Image (spheres, grey):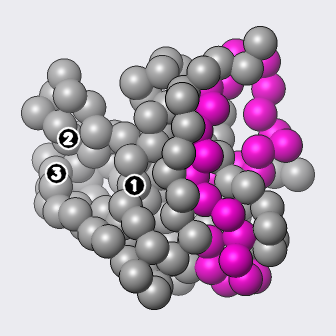
Amino acid sequence: MADLVVTAANVVSGTGAVTEDGTAGATITAGQLLYKDAADSNKWKLNDGNLSQAAADIYGVALASASNNQPLRVQTGGEYNPGATAVVGTVYVGSATAGGIAPAADLASGNFTKVWGVGKTASNIVIVNKGAGVAVP
């Protein structure tokens, strides 16, 4: 499989959505997975499953696009439409591509693991946001 192909204009929050407002620490597109950079005033930056444990620590998904230092709304819990076709029962993780969402089966050696969510319907993912951030051997 491959990363979900997200259409940013179709990303929307769903049932039980938990959101948080913050500041973008990079150019971000709606639908990209993010982490908070403690070393940079807790700005939201793109998750990257093969960069470092800190960068792989998914915290939320961008609900809108923003440029560096602009305000940003992020969903951290509940269900959301990723703007892509999800597969029911598939476990999704942060991709080795910055901000991407990948099926867990795509994890490769050196990728840091953190479960982002599980496909509930063809259009919804339930955010789970669990894991230890351990690198795949």
Q: Is residue 11 above or below residue 62?
A: below
Q: Position of residue 119 (x, y in %)?
A: 71, 70
Residue 61 sits in which quadrant? bottom left
- The residue that disc 3 covers is 23
**Reading the chain from its start, which is encountered first: label 2 or label 3?**
3
Q: For the residue carrying disc 2, how many other residues have a C-alpha within 10 Å: few (<14), some (14-19), or many (20+)?
A: many
Q: Amino acid at mark 1?
A: Gly
**Reading the chain from its start, which is encountered first: label 1 or label 3?**
3
Distance from disc 2 to disc 1, alpha carbons, whole Å, reads 12 Å
**Reading the chain from its start, which is encountered first: label 2 or label 1?**
2
Magenta span: 100-125
- The residue that disc 1 covers is 60
- The residue that disc 2 covers is 43
Q: Is residue 46 left or right of residue 134?
A: left
Q: Is residue 29 above or below residue 95?
A: below
Please name the residue shown 45% across and 87% down the image: 15
Q: Quadrant of the C terminus?
A: top right
Q: Are marks 2 and 3 in contact (CB under 8 Å)?
A: yes
Q: Amino acid at mark 3?
A: Thr
Distance from disc 1 to disc 3, alpha carbons, whole Å, reads 13 Å
Q: Specify whether residue 92 is painted magenta.
A: no
Q: Position of residue 36 (x, y in %)?
A: 28, 39
